[in-house]
Amino acid sequence: MRPLPATILHLSAACLLALAVSAPTSARAQADASTTAGSAPAASAPTLTVEVIGKPTLSLTAADLDAMPRATASLSSDGNTTTYQGVLLYDLLIKAGWQFGRGMTGKGMASYILITARDGYQVLFAPAEIDPAFAGEKVLVADRADNAPLPGPQQPFRIVSPADKMHARSIYSIVKIELVKLRQ
């Protein structure tokens, strides 16, 4: 087996380091997941935070996603196929201010999309994976499944990545999407 080129090894190491640095501490995760004794949870609508370096942070609700162009994607598991409805991750990042296509070349190619679930689980996508000028994979931020609200544990939003052979990046209960540049 041939060794991997040094640039791939450096990029892999940088991604792993970024994940380790951005992982929530257990005390912080527990504090975020619970409310103080005797207090009721906030009655506000669940939000999805979308951050692109150098741009204002977006806080989107299901109503905000409903107002955007809609798309569908299907996942099959254990003989069952579910069709999800939502917004393309590509469209959300454009709304947040990221420039795809030629605007992404050069230093922009050393970037990644970090998606975080409520329980701290995280997955990565490369911006070129979802850019139609490159690979153009359709990754969906879903808020509905088979024309109904997502099942309770998957709410408020989930990622659907139908091109993946394993669905490990199709995570649910997402709360944050970040576009991170490795090089400034």
Image (cartoon, rainbow, N blue to C red):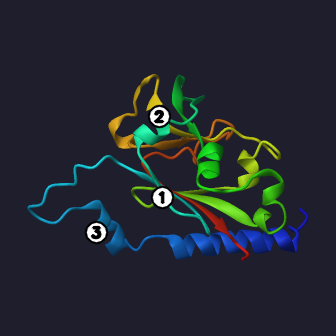
80 over 175 or under it: above or below? above
Quadrant of the frame with the C terminus: bottom right
Residue bearing the label numbered 1 = 121
Residue bearing the label numbered 2 = 66
Q: Name which residue type carries label 2.
A: Asp
Name which residue lies at 12% across and 60% down.
Answer: 39
Q: Earlier in the sequence, mark 1 or mark 2?
A: 2
Tag 2 and tag 3, C-beta contact below 8 Å: no
| Residue 92, disc | none
Badge 2: how crowded within 10 Å, few (<14), some, or many (20+)?
Answer: few
Which label sits in the foreground, 2 or 3?
2
Q: CA distance from mark 2 to mark 3?
A: 30 Å
Q: How far across and how far down the image is residue 26, in percent?
A: 36, 72
Q: Name which residue type carries label 3.
A: Ala
Q: CA distance from mark 1 to mark 3?
A: 16 Å
Badge 3: how crowded within 10 Å, few (<14), some, or many (20+)?
Answer: few
Q: CA distance from mark 1 to mark 2?
A: 25 Å
Q: How far across and how far down the image is residue 118, in percent?
A: 40, 56
Q: Is residue 149 left or right of residue 104?
A: left
| Residue 31, disc | 3
Element on which disc 3 rests? helix
Displayed quadrant of residue 136: top right
Name which residue lies at 48% across and 39% down.
Answer: 65
50 over 80 or under it: above or below? below
Element on which disc 2 rests? helix
Which label sits in the foreground, 1 or 3?
3
Tag 1 and tag 2, C-beta contact below 8 Å: no
